[in-house]
Image: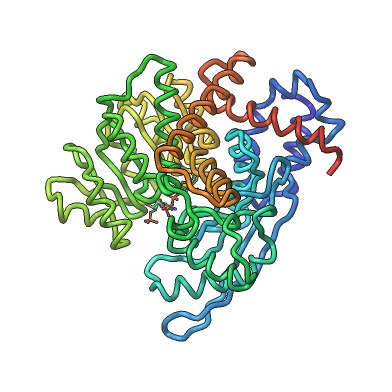
C-alpha cells in the first residue's frame, strides 16, 4: 500500500479506535482512492489532505431533556457533526434511532461530504441526530422531544451555516416540529435552515420521493451502460421507510416487479408484486409493522427475522436494494444473492453493504451502485429546496424530478469516467470515491490551510 495512505490509516485507527463504523467508512474511501494518491497530481501528503479530510471541523454533543406522557423526565443525547464546509454550508440529515452514537454520526458525516460533492451543488457535509427512539411515542412526545432538541441545535445552524434534514426516524412530521421551534426562537422565517419541509410551508415538491427515485435513476443508467433493461426485472428491497417506498414506486413505474420489502422485525414476500398503496397505508399513515401487509394480502408470506440476518436477501432476485441501514447486507447475504443470480445491488441506505460483501459481489460480476452516488438524490433535492427558498419561488413536481434525473445521470457518468480513468472499469464504488475526492482535494488546496 502507498506509504502515505498506510501512515494516515494507522493514525486514524489509533485516534478513533472505538468507532468501528467510522473506521469502516474511512477504510473504504482511502483504499479505493489509492491510484489517485499514487498519481500525486496534488502533493497530498505535504498539504495533509487526507488528515484534514478525515477530521471533522466540529463535533457537537448535547443533552436533550424532555418529559414523556407519563410525566417522567427522559434525557437523550443529541449530536451534530459539522464535518466539512469546503464546498458549501454543512448539509446532511438528522437520525433518531436508539443505535445512534458518535461512530455512526461520524461515518454518516464523512460519507456525506463525498456524496454532496458528487451532486455538483454547493453543499458541504454534516450529520446529526439522537439516540431517541421514536417507536411507540405519541405525537405529543415526538413534538416535545423535537422542541427540546432544537432548543440547543438552533444556535449551531442557519441557512448559510448548517442545514439539517431527515434520515432514519426523522420525516416530515419531525421536520415540522423542529422548524416551528427554530422559527419561534429566532423570531425569523428562515425557510432554508431545514429541508424536507412540508409543501405548505416552504418544502419542495418531490423531496419526499427524491432518494428512492434517484436510486432508480442511477440504477437505470448503470444497467443501460451494460445493455440491461430494467423492465421485467425482479427487485427485492430492505426497509419500508422513506427511501424504500419511493424506490419501490419508481421501480414499478419503470416496469420492474418488486416482490419483497422489510422492516426491523421481518420481511414480506409477495410473488404477485408488492401492493405499494397497502405499504404506504401501513407505514406512512398508521406507522405500523410490515407484517400487517398480510391483512390485505393473505397470500403473501411474512418471514420473521431471527438473529441478525435479514431474510429479505434469501429471496431470489435480479436487483437487490438495501434501503434500511448500515451493514445490513453482509458477506453471507452477498453469497446467497450471488447463488440466486443477482445482477445488481443498489445502495439506497448509507453503507448498507459491509466491505467484504461489496468485494464479493464485484468479484462475482454483480454491478454495485455505491450509496454516496446512488442515494445522493435526496440531498441533491434538498439543495434544490434551498434554492427555491432563496428565490422565494416554487418549481413544479415535474421540474424538480427532471433536475433530479439529470443530476443522477451526471453522477453515474462521473463515477464511470473516474473508474475508467484509473483502469477500474465497472468499479463504481471506486469511481464515486475518486470523483468526489478529486474535487474536494482541489477545493482544499485552493482554500489554503484551514
Ligand atoms: P425511515 O426511518 O423512513 O425508514 C427506515 C427503514 O429501515 C424502516 O423500515 C426501518 O424499520 C428500517 N431500519 C432502520 N434501522 C434498522 C435496523 N437497525 N435494522 C433493520 N431495519 C432497520 O428512514 P429512511 O428511509 O429515510 O432511511 C433509510 C436509509 O437511507 C438510511 O440508511 C438513511 O441514512 C439512508 N438515506 C436516507 C435519505 C433520506 O432522504 N431520507 C437520503 C439518503 C440516504 P423499523 O421501522 O422497523 O425500524
Ligand atoms: O443521507 C442523506 O443523504 C440524507 N439523509 C439526506 C440529507 C439531506 O440533507 O437531505
Question: In percent of the image, x 47 and y 58: which residue is there?
Answer: 170
**Left or right: 85 as drawn, with respect to 104:** right
Q: Position of residue 320 (x, y in %)?
A: 36, 33
Indicate the position of residue 432 as horizontal and vertical percent values: 58, 29
Quadrant where the N terminus lies? top right
Establish if 132 lies above or below 37: below
Quick check: 252 left or right of 67? left
User: Is residue 427 shown above or below 176?
Assistant: above
In-front residue for pair 399/226: 399
- Residue 281 appears left or right of 406: left
Depicted 328 relative to depicted 224: above or below: below
- Position of 10 with respect to 220 (left or right) is right
Q: Quadrant of the C terminus?
A: top right
Image coordinates for residue 128, horizontal then vertical, percent: 59, 57
Would you place residue 305 above or below residue 410 in this image?
below
Residue 291: x percent and y percent? 24, 54
Would residue 180 be visible to someone looking at this image?
yes
Q: Quadrant of residue 435?
A: top right
Residue drawn at the location 55% of the way across and 63% of the way down: 130
Outermost bottom residue? 71
Of 194 and 17, which appears nearest the observer?
194
Image color mode = rainbow
Q: Give the total of numbered labels.
A: 0
The image quadrant that residue 120 belongs to is top right
Q: In the rendered image, is residue 20 in sight?
A: no
Residue placed most toward the observer, 346 or 327 = 346
Amino acid at each position: 500500500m502507498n506509504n502515505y495512505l498506510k501512515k494516515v490509516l494507522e493514525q486514524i485507527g489509533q485516534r478513533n479506535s472505538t468507532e468501528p463504523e467510522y473506521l469502516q467508512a474511512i477504510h473504504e474511501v482511502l483504499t479505493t482512492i489509492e491510484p489517485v494518491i499514487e498519481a500525486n497530481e496534488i502533493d497530498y501528503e505535504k498539504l495533509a489532505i487526507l488528515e484534514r479530510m478525515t477530521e471533522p471541523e466540529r463535533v457537537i454533543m448535547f443533552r436533550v431533556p424532555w418529559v414523556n406522557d407519563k410525566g417522567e423526565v427522559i434525557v437523550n443525547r443529541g449530536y451534530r457533526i459539522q464535518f466539512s464546509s469546503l464546498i458549501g454550508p454543512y448539509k446532511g440529515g438528522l437520525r433518531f434511532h436508539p443505535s445512534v452514537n458518535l461512530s455512526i454520526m461520524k461515518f454518516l458525516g464523512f460519507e456525506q461530504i463525498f456524496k454532496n460533492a458528487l451532486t455538483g451543488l454547493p453543499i458541504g457535509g454534516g450529520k446529526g441526530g439522537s439516540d431517541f427512539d421514536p417507536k411507540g411515542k405519541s405525537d405529543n412526545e415526538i413534538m416535545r422531544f423535537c422542541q427540546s432538541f432544537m432548543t440547543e441545535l438552533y444556535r449551531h445552524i442557519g441557512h448559510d451555516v448548517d442545514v439539517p434534514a431527515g434520515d432514519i426516524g426523522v420525516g416530515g412530521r419531525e421536520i415540522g416540529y423542529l422548524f416551528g421551534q427554530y422559527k419561534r426562537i429566532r423570531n425569523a422565517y428562515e425557510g432554508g435552515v431545514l429541508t424536507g419541509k412540508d409543501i405548505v410551508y416552504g418544502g419542495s415538491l418531490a423531496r419526499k420521493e427524491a432518494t428512492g427515485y434517484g436510486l432508480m435513476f442511477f440504477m437505470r443508467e448503470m444497467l443501460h451502460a451494460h445493455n440491461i433493461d430494467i423492465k421485467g426485472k425482479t427487485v427485492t428491497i430492505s426497509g419500508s421507510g422513506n427511501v424504500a417506498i419511493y424506490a419501490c414506486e419508481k421501480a414499478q413505474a419503470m416496469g420492474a416487479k418488486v416482490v419483497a420489502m422489510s422492516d426491523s422485525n421481518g420481511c414480506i414476500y409477495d410473488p404477485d408484486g408488492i401492493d405499494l398503496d397497502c405499504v404506504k397505508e401501513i407505514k406512512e399513515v398508521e406507522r405500523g409493522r410490515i407484517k400487517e401487509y398480510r391483512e390485505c394480502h393473505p397470500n403473501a408470506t411474512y418471514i420473521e427475522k431471527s438473529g441478525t440476518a435479514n431474510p429479505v436477501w434469501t429471496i431470489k432476485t435480479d436487483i437487490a436494494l438495501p434501503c434500511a441501514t448500515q451493514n445490513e447486507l453482509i458477506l453471507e447475504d452477498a453469497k446467497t444473492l450471488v447463488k440466486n443470480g443477482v445482477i445488481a445491488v443498489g445502495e439506497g441506505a448509507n453503507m448498507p453493504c459491509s466491505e467484504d460483501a461489496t468485494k464479493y459481489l464485484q468479484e462475482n460480476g454483480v454491478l454495485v451502485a455505491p450509496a454516496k452516488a446512488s442515494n445522493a438524490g435526496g440531498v441533491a433535492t434538498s439543495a434544490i429546496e434551498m434554492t427555491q427558498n432563496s428565490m422565494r419561488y416554487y418549481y413544479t413536481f415535474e421540474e424538480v424530478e427532471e433536475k433530479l434525473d439529470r443530476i443522477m445521470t451526471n453522477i453515474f457518468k462521473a463515477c464511470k469516467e473516474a473508474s475508467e480513468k484509473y483502469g477500474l472499469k465497472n468499479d463504481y464504488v471506486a469511481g464515486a470515491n475518486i470523483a468526489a475526492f478529486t474535487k474536494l482535494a482541489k477545493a482544499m488546496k485552493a482554500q489554503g490551510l484551514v
